[in-house]
Image: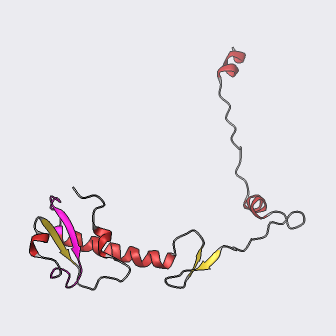
Amino acid sequence: SLIDTLKDAFLFAVPKSRRTIQKRRNRRFGFPQYHWKMLVPKTNLINCNTCGHPQEAGVLCPNCYKRIREETEAMQKAIEAELKLEPIDKEVVVLYDNEIQEKGSEFWQGKRIVEMKKERPSWFSENLLQKTTEE
C-alpha cells in the first residue's frame, strides 16, 4: 500500500529553505577569493541627437520620451475634460492655438474639436494625428 502511494505521488523539485543573502550575492557577484564578477561598465552609450542627453544605443532617449509622454498626457486630459463621459460618436481632432483658421469650416464638419491652449511643439507634426487610410 505504501509502495502504491509512492508511485502515485508527485515530487516537486523545490528547495527546502531559502538561500541566504550572502549566498545570493555570491552567486550574483562571485567570490572575492576565487572568481570575482565585477560590475561591467556600459560601452554602448551615445548622446541623443535631439537633446544631447546620454542614452543607450538602440533605445529611445529617456529625456525625449518623457517630453513626448507629458504632451500626450496633456492631450488626453484636454480630451477628457472636453468630452467628459459622453460616448465618442464622431472623430476627435486636437487643435493647438490658431490652427482652426488655417482650414475651411467645411473641413471641421462632423468632427469633435478639442483645443489646446498652447502652441504646437516643433517635434509634433500635424500628420501624426491623421488616419493612415482614408475611407
Q: Is residue 35 left or right of residue 53?
A: right
- Residue 26's place in the image compared with 43, above or below, is above
Where does the N terminus fall, quadrant-wise? Answer: top right
Is 123 a magenta residue? Answer: no
Q: Is residue 135 left or right of residue 106?
A: right
- Residue 79's place in the image compared with 47, above or below, is above
Residue at image point 80% right, 66% down: 37
Residue at image point 16% right, 77% down: 103
Q: Is residue 85 visible?
A: no
Residue 96 is situated, as x and y percent measured from the top left of the image, at: 24, 80
Count of all numbered marks drawn on residues in the image: 0
Is 88 a magenta residue? Answer: yes
Query: Observer-nearest residue: 58 or 1?
Result: 58
Q: Is residue 37 visible?
A: yes
Query: Observer-nearest residue: 77 or 28?
Result: 77
Quarter of the view holding residue 123:
bottom left
Quarter of the view holding residue 79:
bottom left
Residue 45 is situated, as x and y percent measured from the top left of the image, at: 64, 76
Query: Observer-nearest residue: 101 or 16?
Result: 101
Residue 65 is situated, as x and y percent measured from the top left of the image, at: 45, 74
Query: Observer-nearest residue: 16 or 47?
Result: 47
Q: Is residue 106 left or right of residue 4?
A: left
Q: Residue furthest right?
A: 33
Q: From which residue to which does the magenta span run?
A: 83-101
Where does the C terminus fall, quadrant-wise? Answer: bottom left
